[in-house]
Image (cartoon, rainbow, N blue to C red):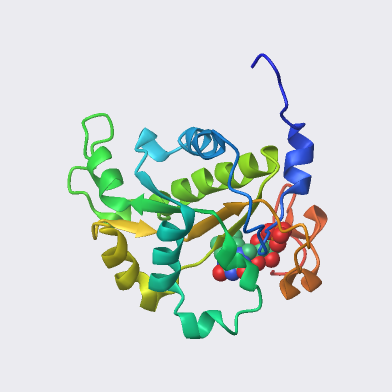
Amino acid sequence: MDEDLSMEFQDVVRRRRMVRTFDPDRPLPDGALDRMLDNAVRAPSAGFSQGWAFLALEGRDETTRFWDATFPAIERSSFEWPGLFDVPTIVVPLSHKQAYLDRYAEPDKGVTDKRESFWPVPYWDIDTGFAAMLILLTAVDEGLGALFFGIFPERMAGFREAFGVPDEYTPIGAIALGYESPAGDRPSGSLKRGRRPASDVVHRGRWQGGSR
Ligand SMILES: Cc1cc2nc3c(=O)[nH]c(=O)nc-3n(C[C@H](O)[C@H](O)[C@H](O)COP(=O)(O)O)c2cc1C
């Protein structure tokens, strides 16, 4: 990069937090969405399967179609963070299990019966999650706010229908991307739980301490 405006990596990690109230008047800066998506596809993936896809929605028409499909107006009116619906951009990362089953049936892997029991955990969702994390971190690097949030199971069919998403692809959630409202955001009540320090969750050498 000629002019490197990027943040220090440690600052990016430490500043990352979910933002739920966006500035309705500020779209993403030029090229920011492409930079986030270009970083997303640098995520690692099992067998380099890259079984992911990203539905990028920009501007009112497209984001309104998303909210209408996933968050009915009646529920929106009582939602704790109404400023979420002002977000200018949404990226939906989708995982593609079949791409992994097919990739691992190739000669260098040899899982020819494509059995799901081969998989210790669903790497298609994990790898798509890695890609989503790169989007979240790149958003911080761009000075943007972001929220990763779930799409409720009962809204999945409506979401697919609204955007013509094939059945083989499963959204792992959605990412709202925009500038935080100048009026600020309200932190989630979940944060009262406090961050569990590494010393609580790391087991060195062997499992010891409590069962959690
Ligand atoms: C898989 C996943 C799903 C989440 N779903 C939601 C959601 O549906 N709504 C929401 O407001 N926040 C959601 N969050 C954000 C978490 O509440 C947030 O990450 C957590 O409270 C820690 O806060 P921080 O990310 O700002 O550090 C989700 C986060 C993850 C990783």
Q: Residue furthest top?
A: 2
Give residue 48's position: percent from left, percent from top: 38, 33
**Relative to 170, 206 lies left or right:** right
**Residue drawn 72% across and 72% down?**
190
Can residue 37 be seen here? yes
Q: Residue at x 30, y 45 (%)?
A: 100
The reply, left or right, for residue 54 in relation to residue 191 is: left
Residue 143 quadrant: top right
Q: Position of residue 210 (x, y in %)?
A: 75, 69
Q: Nearer the viewer, residue 15 or 69?
A: 69
The quarter of the picture showing ligand 1: bottom right
> In the displayed structure, would residue 199 be above or below residue 135?
below
Compare residues 186 and 102 and report the one nearer the observer: 186
Residue at position x 47%, y 80% in the image: 73
Is 111 displayed left or right of 93 in the figure?
left
Is residue 188 positioned above or below 177 on the image?
A: below
Q: Quadrant of residue 21?
A: bottom right
Q: Residue at x 72, y 71 (%)?
A: 188
Where residue 102 appears, x then y in whole percent? Answer: 22, 42
Q: Nearer the viewer, residue 69 or 169?
A: 69
Q: Is residue 93 left or right of residue 23?
A: left
